[in-house]
Image (cartoon, rainbow, N blue to C red):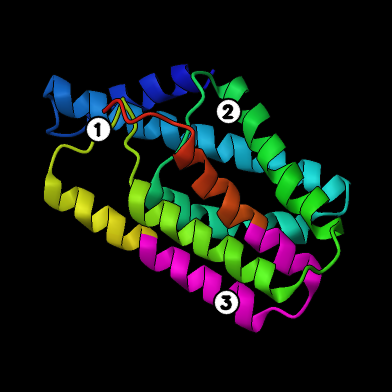
């Protein structure tokens, strides 16, 4: 259904604009499909986490995820259903389980944060096979952004969040983002 809608929107753009090159139309269709898939996923997640009373944790985790993973990259499922399942599992860990954990010793949080930053520095960005990073300058730019957002969120989480539930939620989000970079081989 999403694919059909993306095809119709791309066809509309082709017929009502000066864009007619196949490469450009394929890029537009890919972008539309990606946006529609993400919107579908976000709506499902918001409904689900609202029903179980964990919407605040979901939104906090989602904010961290979107601002770090966008630049660091990570694993991608091959289907929308697979992506929805993995994303739901991701947010179940960060927004349901992590907030239930007790507050840990501060040195553990510092150690995990340092580990996260090292992984981001060494492994980011991880390109997507559909959207490879071809230019070295672009790769460096994405790496700098991934590192910057990771440092920003680590600082906010460690030094400005006193609530252990949000502390654990935020740190779990960053750790799950960086752990994806460890277990994937760079193919692209």
Neighbour tally class for label 3: few under 14, some 14-19, many 20 plus, Cα within 10 Å: few
Measure the alpha-carbon separation of dots 1 and 3: 31 Å
Q: Which residue is mark 3?
A: 156
Q: Which residue is mark 2?
A: 83
SS at circle 1: loop
Neighbour tally class for label 1: few under 14, some 14-19, many 20 plus, Cα within 10 Å: few
Nearest to N terminus: mark 2 or mark 1: 2
For discs 2 and 3, the disc positioned in front in the rendered view: 3
SS at circle 2: helix
Measure the alpha-carbon separation of dots 2 and 3: 28 Å
Nearest to N terminus: mark 1 or mark 3: 1
Q: Which residues are magenta?
A: 147-171
Label 1–label 3 contact, CB within 8 A: no
Quick one: 107 or 92, which is closer to the camera? 107
SS at circle 3: helix
Label 2–label 1 contact, CB within 8 A: no
- Quarter-of-image position of residue 121: bottom left
Quick one: 176 or 18, which is closer to the camera? 176
Nearest to N terminus: mark 2 or mark 3: 2
Q: Which residue is mark 1?
A: 132
The C terminus - image quarter:
top left
Q: Is residue 91 above or below residue 117?
A: above
Query: Mainly helix, strand or loop, the magenta region?
Result: helix
Q: Position of residue 185 (x, y in %)?
A: 38, 29
Residue at 52 percent across and 38 percent down: it is 38
Describe residue 94's horizontal placement relative to residue 182 as left or right. right
């Amino acid at each position: 259904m999403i694919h059909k809608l993306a095809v119709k929107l791309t066809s509309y753009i082709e017929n009502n604009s000066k864009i007619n090159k196949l490469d450009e139309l394929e890029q537009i269709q890919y972008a539309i499909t990606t946006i529609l898939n993400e919107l579908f996923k976000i709506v499902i997640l918001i409904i689900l986490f609202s029903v179980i009373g964990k919407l605040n944790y979901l939104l906090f985790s989602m904010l961290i995820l979107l601002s770090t993973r966008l630049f660091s990259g990570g694993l991608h499922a091959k289907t929308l259903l697979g992506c929805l399942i993995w994303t739901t599992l991701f947010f179940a860990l960060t927004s349901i389980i992590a907030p239930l954990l007790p507050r840990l010793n501060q040195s553990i949080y510092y150690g995990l944060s340092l580990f996260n930053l090292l992984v981001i520095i060494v492994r980011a960005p991880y390109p997507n096979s559909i959207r490879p990073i071809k230019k070295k300058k672009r790769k460096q730019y994405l790496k700098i952004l991934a590192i910057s957002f990771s440092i920003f969120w680590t600082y906010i989480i460690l030094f400005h969040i006193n609530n252990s539930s949000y502390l654990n939620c935020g740190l779990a989000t960053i750790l799950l983002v960086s752990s994806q970079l460890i277990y994937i081989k760079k193919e692209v």
